[in-house]
Amino acid sequence: MRPRAVDEHDFRLLWAGDVVSHVGTQITLFALPVLAVATLEVTGSQIGLLQALYTLPFLLVPIPAGVWIERRPLLTVLIAGQLVCAALVLSVPVADVLDRLGLVQLYTVAVLGGAAIIVCDIAKVSLIPRLVHADRLAAANSRIAIGLAVGLTAGPVLASALTALGGPSLALTVDGVTYLVGIALLARLHHRDRPTAEPDAGRRQVLAEVRAGLRTVFGSPSIRNIAVHTALFNGGVQVLSVAIVVYFVRDLGYGSAAFGVAMLCGGAGAVLGAVVAPALIRRLGHGTTLLATIGVTVNAFWVLPSAHGSAATVVVLCGLAMVVGLAGGGVAGVTSVTVRQLLTPKALHARMNASYQLVNLSTTPIAAIVSGYLVDGVGARDTLWIAAGVLAISVVPLTHRAVRSLGTVVEPVPARQG
């Protein structure tokens, strides 16, 4: 029997709050550097440091956060993380109005905000299997991925409009309100969970739990290979995203509107992939869905540096390439998180998600730095060729038998704590 649509009351509230929070996060990522440039007249290197500080928690926070989260109720962690984000974001326009805003405050907001977002993401992904049945996880993760894609697409557009209307402080104020809305939605959840680990566990037990969390990723051939693929894919996308804006705006002279169209197409592709993922999983199984979709759609990225002709032709071809390429990424995102949730016992979900995030996001700050040097050294177009090559290589880990053999039914492995 085909699984029913996900219709749980608590999951709907979680999903709605997640979409609002994603939109808010994108507003911050847009408005914070704009405010720094417009108000504080910062240099390019200072903007680069601001971005680096935001991504630094992606490497340092996941592992200790995973152990810490398992000692607390997931919903409480999620609400507390949203409160921290709201307070950090709203502190910026308040300081701006009082003429007390400084670069140190923006750096603090970036690093603490990045840490809070990582904690919230680990708690959210760990909470979902407690709200929906196993046969509905793919549908639930599809909706979560759709919400993320909507946030990534709508957030910058809304931020741009708000900044034009009332400046970056107005945009950040609206962002703070979005976090408060998300908190109000989460507070209405009926679900209450207990921590999966004792709050007063000793240091030796904590270290054992860290090893157990790492083992869920590195000790499982399926999860490990999917994690390596995701890290390579994210690194390639990061290189692409830096190079394509320079290629469109500076090298081709098409302006920011053309670049915006390409990014909008990418967001639409991610939504499309997330929507069709559950049906593909039911028909093909998890492993074949991953390998087939990524193996085919990743080739679309070769179009970006090779497209030529009139401006309209290049924009259309690149837009279609972004739709197809990121549709594959959308399918893979839904499939990979579902596999992780099914393969891992619930008691290890927070630690598993933390360990996975460490691998998954490890390439992002490195790729951001490398891509800048590549654009300056070999040019934006050649950097796009390099990005396409990295994205193509990301398929290789998915050819492993442990991934290919994942069918429609995935049984969890027994939990080992030590």
Image (tube, grey):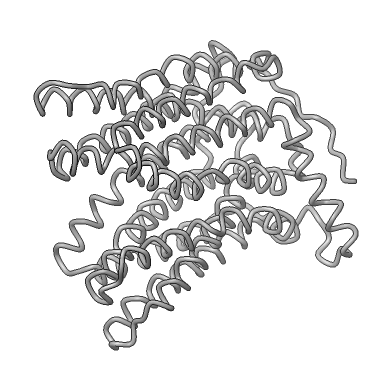
Dividing the picture into quadrants, the one containing residue 385 is: top left
Task: Where is residue 347? Give x, y as percent.
Answer: 77, 45
Dividing the picture into quadrants, the one containing residue 395 is: top right
69 over 312 or under it: above or below: below
Q: In percent of the image, x 65 and y 56: which residue is there? A: 74
Q: In percent of the image, x 38 and y 41: which residue is there? A: 374
105 over 259 or under it: above or below: below
Q: Nearer the viewer, residue 79 or 24?
A: 24
Q: Nearer the viewer, residue 107 or 20?
A: 107
Quarter of the picture containing the N terminus is top right
Task: Where is residue 314? Give x, y as percent.
Answer: 17, 25
187 over 106 or under it: above or below: above
Q: Residue furthest top?
A: 283
Relative to 14, 413 lies left or right: right
Relative to 190, 388 lies left or right: left
Q: Residue furthest front?
A: 377
Dividing the picture into quadrants, the one containing residue 401 is: top right
Q: In percent of the image, x 19 and y 39: which residue is there? A: 251
- Counting labels gives 0
Relative to 309, 59 lies left or right: right
Task: Where is residue 399? Give x, y as percent.
Answer: 61, 16
Q: In percent of the image, x 47 and y 17: which residue is there? A: 293
Task: Where is residue 116? Give x, y as percent.
Answer: 54, 62
